[in-house]
Amino acid sequence: MAKGKQNQGTEKTEKKPASSSSGATQGSLFRNLIIIFLLSVIFVGIYALNDKRVELPDLYNELQTLKERPGDHDGRINEIEHRITEIETDTSFFKTLFVGYFDEIHFVAFGAQDQIDKVTAEIQNGSSAPVTREDKLNYKVHTYRLLDFINANTPANAVILLPPTDSIVNDSRWNYVSDPQWVEYFIYPRLCIESGKESENPELAKRITHVLIVKGIGYNKLKYDVPLDKREKVCLLPVNKPVDVPETTDSTQTSN
Amino acid sequence: MLIIGILLCYLTGCSVVMAVSRRFSLAEIIGYSFLVGMGVETIFLFLLDIVQLHYTSFLLIALNLFVIIALNRKFPETITAFKEKYTELRAGALSINYVALFLFSIIAYLFYTITIKNLFWPPAEGDSITSFDKLARVIAMEGKLKISLFQYNLQGAAGVYPPLFHGSFAYVYIFGAETPKIVITFFFLSLLLIFYSFVKSYTNAIAAMLFTLILMATPELYAHAALALGNMPTAAYICGAVLSTYMWLDRDDEKYFWMGAIMMGFSVWIRSDAIAFVIAVLCMIAIKVWQNKDYKRLLIFAVIALVPFVSWLLYVKLKIELPQASRFDTGIGYNADRLNTMINYVRAYLFASSYRQVQGGQLYGIVFISFFVALAINTTLAFKKGVKTVFGNQGMLLVFLLIAFSIYFTEFYLINEAVQASTIASLMASSFKRGMFYFLPVVLFYTATCYSSKLLFDKLEKFRTGQ
């Protein structure tokens, strides 16, 4: 490509500063150590500026636990919230510049391996089985088992009707389960469509084979009736009545 | 098989780089090789899709071998070039710069920790699941770019993005990867190596290591080195493109002209909105062309940089045939509220202030602040020493930054919120924020190599060496 002119610029690239990295052989090791010491002091100083943030993960964990646990913990909750606010708002302009570095060094650089070990131990739960991609996804995506259940119990050409977004929007447990773009990742080659959006994709709507019922919503999309006492809150049902299954039971039904 | 795939990608990229010139530094060769190699792999995927050949690892191996052999007809010369580099490296190793070594060890540690985090977790980010990784897995399974999901509008927002990023994921899946995040590590490594080698060629090893450390440790960028998202890889291509072009303009070194053009082409092959940087780079070249009247160069650069962009536009229009409403509302006119919201976010990012949920300092640390401080010091010095002495050719970089940022800002100002299904505040807090990555290497390059920094680091070096 540039063969003819390859040498043209090479002489000019020699234009390096006079002070290029000549080694300690020319200077003194002592001077190098002084600079290293000064840099270390700066780095440690930057780290120490925001070291109160070390407490944050434990405080947030405790706060969440207390909020989920029944009983009167208002006193402790107020105390924790006050401490969190105190740490989070301790942000002079200078400190703010280095908060991100602190989090990155403390929680990622120093904490990555510990976090991985902790998650691995939690997933393995006492066994020594290797942790798979599915295990990790199950750890990160709390609806993974449900999505995996869809794969295990439907044919590859199934089309799943997902619950409408407005039915689950305020419930973080079901985050994204109504989003076809998101669910598709886990269930491909099966396809999916959101309930209420059938008109946007009529071809796909005609091919719906199963209905994913969440929070008991979606029974009206089935072409048969399920007795009220047999209705599960979370289940996957074929859209047409299964011919080989007695009316009162359903082999594809599951609870989550 | 995965190792073969990665190795072939590096070798193909290296062959292209060596065909441009055998006189790149080792850091440049390694850094460029992956970026160019992955760019070429996705061109293979694109062309195979056009001729309707199903992707297989063996087909890709054959194509790579063909390119490697075709470009290495002068293989002995390449070997000689590598031997020379090895000799230089050995000679350099005898004179250890302990300060640079200390900084390097911190970089290596940070790189190691983010890599183990990156490789442990499979992609789980929203954009990756709804788009990038989904596209990649299905492309690898169906063996084509125009996958079946387009038929049902289930491809996700990145379905119309150029294929370099999700194509790189698809490439490693084709070679049997369980998760594709290994490529994120290589993109990050390439970004750091290229940035280091450019700063090093203008200053000394300590400054180059220190600013590489500052770049890598930029909180938001560092976090993205463990996420399956395309912004950091795009920053790597833009870094290579802009700094190579600047090097060519500043030192009239031919090899950087070609690398600049190639990297610019790949920048729009990874994200179409990088077109803002193509325009800004062309303006930077135009300033030079205005002086030397070498219009041919400008034309060649523009063609190489724009062909991928145009090819992808045609592909989306003619092959994917996706009905699209325009992302931009050019009839928006003057909207004070919108402009005000955008300016507040920009102020938060650039001046480390806070606005709504954004804490600029937490995201970009000292990067932009140090740039403005350096700029202020240089401006003051320019009164004493003269503008030409203090700014020299770096004025071109400042012009580039100004134009690129203005176009980038305008792109967001014109975005149609309804089509994007997102408010401008939400776009500023997410997409715009991540797009700031593209400016980081250039901004830090200026800070590291400007007149005042050079004075400072020259003094430090003199102290260190006792001269």
Image: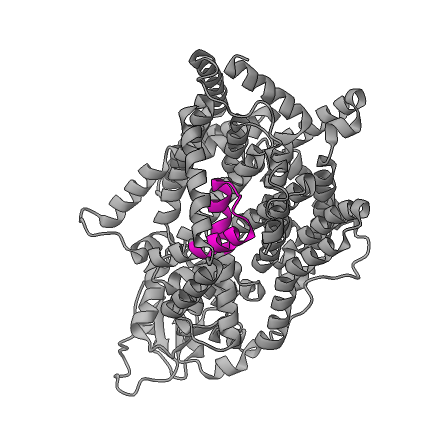
Quadrant assignment, res A215: bottom left
* Residue at screen point 42% across, 73% down: B142
Position of residue A99 relative to residue B32, above or below, is above
Q: Mainly helix, strand or loop, the magenta region?
A: helix
Q: Say whether residue B130 is visible.
A: no
Q: Residue at x 26, y 78 (%)?
A: A249
The front one of B426 and B346 is: B346
Taking the magenta stretch, the answer to whether it contains residue B12 is yes
Is residue A215 shown in magenta? no
Q: Nearer the viewer, residue A245 or B362?
A: B362
* Residue located 69% across and 66% down the image: B326
- Residue placed farthest to the left in the image? A127
Q: Where residue B58 sits: x, y (%)?
A: 36, 69
Q: Quadrant of residue A217?
A: bottom left
Up-down relation of residue B275 to residue A56 (above or below): below
Q: Is residue A184 left or right of residue B328?
A: left
Residue B191 rendering spot, x and y as whole percentages: 51, 44
Q: How many marks?
A: 0
* Residue numbers of the magenta segment: B11-36
Q: Which of the image's four quarters has the N terminus of chain B?
A: bottom left
Residue B15 visible in rendering: yes
Q: Does residue A156 sit above or below B418 in this rendering?
A: below
